[in-house]
Amino acid sequence: MDYVAWEQRMSVGVDVLDGDHKRLLAMFNGLLAGGVSARAKDDVSGLLGDLRDYTDVHFRREEEWMERAGYPDLESHRAAHRHFVAEVEKLRREFDDSHAVMLRIDLILLLKDWLIDHIQTVDMRYKPFLAGSDVAASGAAPTG
């Protein structure tokens, strides 16, 4: 069961970025499916690592698309990405000293905020720039 289902209105108009967002949404749904019990501390640890690794790949890809499209608010977007990474790292550092239930709740809140606010609001700001870019029109991913 998906707690938060992907909807077409969430699309940024670039298949690879939409795929990334769907994967992040799947991580969030997996976290919600585990509930807030302390029994799954290893699951949270694994998710924190996966989240850190995957957001690194996704953010780099997304920023490259925005750069190629000439998105004017790129630096602000990069700052939002750095903030999210810092929050995930903060949770990772606190993991060993934290109560697993509280850590899970903090992670749920962070991902909820990110999926609802960032992807559905902030990422939508670059959608018109990417949709009109030569790179997006070609269907090819930008290359460094």
Image: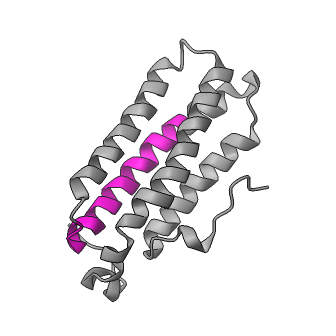
Q: Position of residue 56 (x, y in %)?
A: 37, 48
Q: Residue furthest bottom?
A: 138
Classify 62 as above or below 27: below
Q: Position of residue 70 (x, y in %)?
A: 20, 70
Residue drawn at x 43%, y 75% as measured from the top left: 14
Residue drawn at x 71%, y 42% as measured from the top left: 32
**56 in the magenta segment:** yes
Residue 144 is left or right of residue 32, and the answer is: left
Q: Nearer the viewer, residue 32 or 53?
A: 32
Rendered image quadrant of residue 13 = bottom left
Q: Nearer the viewer, residue 51 or 85?
A: 85
Classify 125 as above or below 45: below
Residue drawn at x 49%, y 37% as measured from the top left: 49
**64 in the magenta segment:** yes
Q: Position of residue 2 (x, y in %)?
A: 74, 56
Residue 30 is left or right of residue 75, and the answer is: right
> What's drawn in magenta, residue-wise?
48-71
Q: Residue furthest top?
A: 97
Rendered image quadrant of residue 16 = bottom left
Q: Position of residue 139 (x, y in %)?
A: 37, 84
Q: Nearer the viewer, residue 80 or 27?
A: 80
Tell me the colour scheme of the image: one colour
Residue 122 is left or right of residue 39, and the answer is: left
Q: Quadrant of the C terminus?
A: bottom left
Rendered image quadrant of residue 109 = top right
Residue drawn at x 34%, y 67% as measured from the top left: 126
- How many marks can you see? 0
Classify 37 as above or below 28: above
Main SS type for the magenta part? helix
Q: Quadrant of the N terminus?
A: bottom right
